Amino acid sequence: MTIDAVRSRPRLVTTVLVGAAGLLLLCAGARLTHLDDLIGWPFPAFNAFTPLLYLPAYPLAAVALLRYVRQRGSDTRGPAEAARPARAITMGAVAVAMVGVIASHLVWTVPEFVGAGQRAGSASTAASVRLMTANVNGANTEVARIAEQLDRERPGLLLLEEYTPLIAGRLHGLTQLRAFPYVVERPSLEPYGYAVFSRFPLTGRPDLNSAGFPFARMDVALGGGRHVELVVVHTRSPVGATYTRRWARQLADLRTDACQARRPLVFAGDFNATRDHRPFRRLLACGLHDAHDVAGGGWSPTWSATAWWKETTRIDHILVSSDITVSRYHRGSPFGSDHLPISADLRI
């Protein structure tokens, strides 16, 4: 190995460290300054993977700090060492920047692992219902495997998104679905098809139409004069600039609807959003609570169950208004869809 090659190695390491740190700092900075909302795509994709995206900041900070200490303590009298002070300053800056990214990462991620606790009381005579929701994936040829989870969970309300004619045909023969006397179905080749299976009477209400997607809305009569408004959610996936704008519009419309609600409300389904998306946090700020957070669901991502990297982000949610309590949250197992089902026990 030549002397020039030996001398170039520290420069290469410095370049790699600075480049990696710069990318993380760009993503974090865009989020902190709200540029992610202004720019749009691809930041929703980056934000969706926040718990994992910033993990490289931890070893980067450690390596940069070690190199800073070593280079500061090196003899700089030789001509070959003339660049060491500059590299030391660079490594110090990288270490400081990554500490800032780590602090932000902890603030953003720790709430995913720590339960928020019960936010609202409920009378002892409140009606109880177990709600289960799943994006079944419209082309899922193994969808009947969900029967095993229906046997275990025995939900009172079952919501299915991406309900296509194929899915409807494969599920209609399931014995488990005969336990639901009330059924509302809208199979579609488009991704907004849905089905609601209920042990309680359902009354259809006008859909919440947003950015070309109809979100089904219905009244659920739980007995004893208690009713809850149910909205089946399946937003656009924020992939590409056009769909990202539609996705943000849909979450904004859901927020408007939630802010105007005057009775118990449940939004459930595939939001294609996590707590790390500002439009989703704005939705929660309108008096809704994530059943996962209330029950302390911990690290329980729901997508993508069919990818080689398995589940890495939680984009399926059951959101409830403050007059509904949550006593249990459960993430189901794979059944051929790229999403995992989730369920929650609600008292209304």
Image (cartoon, rainbow, N blue to C red):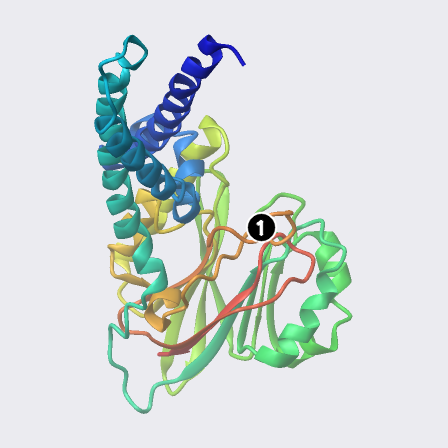
At mark 1, the secondary structure is: loop
Q: Does 327 sit left or right of 69 as displayed?
A: right
Q: Residue furthest bottom?
A: 124
Q: For the C terminus, which image quadrant?
A: bottom left
> How many numbered markers are drawn?
1
Rendering coords of residue 24 (x, y %): 35, 33
Q: Does 8 sit left or right of 34 as displayed?
A: right
Q: Residues within 10 Å of mark 1 (few under 14, many from 20)?
A: some
Q: For the N terminus, which image quadrant?
A: top right
Q: Is residue 38 above or below residue 174?
A: above
Is 140 or 348 nearer to us in this picture? 140
Q: Residue at x 71, y 59 (%)?
A: 168
Is 270 or 11 nearer to us in this picture? 11
Q: Is residue 163 above or below residue 105?
A: below
Image quadrant where residue 8 sits: top left
Is 240 or 212 nearer to us in this picture? 240
Let me know if residue 243 appears in the view. yes
Three-letter amino acid code at the position of disc 1: Ser
Q: Does 1 sit left or right of 252 as displayed?
A: right
Q: Residue at x 44, y 19 (%)?
A: 9
Residue at the spot of label 1:
304
Let me know if residue 37 appears in the view. no
Rendering coords of residue 218 (x, y %): 46, 64
Rendering coords of residue 190 (x, y %): 62, 43
Rendering coords of residue 83 (x, y %): 27, 13
Image quadrant where residue 159 sits: bottom right
Q: Is residue 226 above or below residue 249?
A: below
